[in-house]
Amino acid sequence: MTTDIRPLDGIRVVEMTHMIMGPSCAMFLGMLGAEVIKVEPPEGDKTRNLTGMGRGFYPTFNRGKKSVTLDLKSDAGKAALHTLLATADVFVENFRDQSLARMGFAPDVLKARYPSLIVSSLKGFLKGPYENRTAMDEVVQMMTGMAYMTGPTGRPLRIGSSANDIMGGLFGAFAVLAALLERQKDGRGHVLRTGLFENCLFLVAQHMVQFDIEGREAPPMPEREFSWPVYDIFETRDARQIFVGAVTEGQWVTLCRILGLQDLLDDPALQTRMDQINDRDRTIPVVAEAVRTRDFADLIAAFEPAGIPFSPIHRPAEMYDDPHVNRPGGLFASTLPEGQTYRAPAMPFEIDDRPLTGGTLDIRDIGADTQAVLSAAGLDARDIARASGRAVQA
């Protein structure tokens, strides 16, 4: 059962974005209860047609949005967008600055025309020397050192999801919430800009700060200097991989007792956490051998009640079989325009012990809401047909 709390109920968001960062920003606002109207070109957002690893982009980050098609190459399409913006609280876009300006929708123009409108621009970079560069998730991961920290030396590697784009969208939504609160005080709209590069920079800040304080660089994560006695992947007797951590003195003692490693507990050279960290070359093979004598199920049955950090090594597809993921509210079903259903995670927080969705989470067909939304905004059938650039669905 979901919560009835919809903090953004009554807020209208007009979104003109593609790929992940922009769509995720608007989706987060929609999950908080806002009405999100996605403006697509007559042929639809190109992200709809991605295949392979991109197949999940559109269904994941466009749940619960209305779809309106506008031909922004035409005067009728541009006029219709202005009509929509006059009814909106928030405009979310991720076009190149020059492209948006050519269409007549630059943020400063919109700010002057719609004084209470909040314009949220999701860009590759904030204002500065790089502001006009083309950026993608992988580009900024390489630029900021994220890829360097993820792969072994000489083999930079992007992280295994679009986490940077998603977190950039989350910062965009966070900024919108701040601007909505500020508007309650001053009655004015605000122009927001969220940078994908700066978002990724924030993610590597801990490594930057370590260097600034100590004057030495952290090695890539596969070669990292460990700050804990046990923080490793092992193999069990039944050939399952398991991650096990022991990061405190108490966890070290508990782990050794579970694994029957009394010799390590009695060793005078291993009586402090620093002793245990500095002697990892000797102790980790001993722990690995002990883990290898136990079955996976036996270990997790001992680790969980004892408070030992552990985890199986899973593939994303296996999450559909995870009992915690399948708890009430962990996954929500959505329907594609052709009728196929799929499941995707809910927002990763609860209010009063309940998850929230903000309403329906289905994917609308291209332009499915054009007629209803534009007619409600005052356009007649002829204006809608000219503005939409396609046969309008009834």
Image: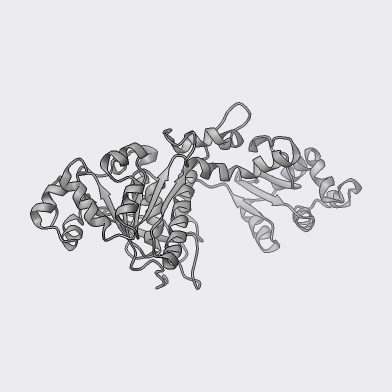
Question: Is 392 displayed left or right of 91 in the figure?
Answer: left
Res. 378 in view: yes
Instruction: Residue at 68% x, 59% y: name it.
Output: 302
Residue 5: quadrant of the picture: bottom left
Report the colour scheme: one colour
Numbered-mark total: 0
Q: Position of residue 324 (x, y in %)?
A: 51, 61
Residue 9: quadrant of the picture: bottom left
Relative to the observer, which residue lies in front, 248 or 68? 68
Location of the N terminus (image quadrant): bottom left
Relative to the observer, which residue lies in front, 3 or 116? 116
Residue 253: quadrant of the picture: bottom right
Instruction: Residue at 29% x, 52% y: name it.
Output: 38
Res. 329 in view: no
Depicted 2 relative to depicted 70: above or below = below
Q: Position of residue 158 (x, y in %)?
A: 52, 36
Residue furthest left in the image: 382
Relative to the observer, which residue lies in front, 121 or 368? 121
Relative to the observer, which residue lies in front, 298 or 127? 127
Residue furthest top in the image: 154
Question: Is 23 displayed left or right of 130 in the figure?
Answer: left
Q: Position of residue 323 (x, y in %)?
A: 50, 60
Question: Is 381 displayed left or right of 368 in the figure?
Answer: left
Residue furthest right in the image: 268
Residue furthest front in the image: 112
Q: Position of residue 224 (x, y in %)?
A: 69, 38
Depicted 254 relative to depicted 354: above or below = above
Location of the C terminus (image quadrant): bottom left
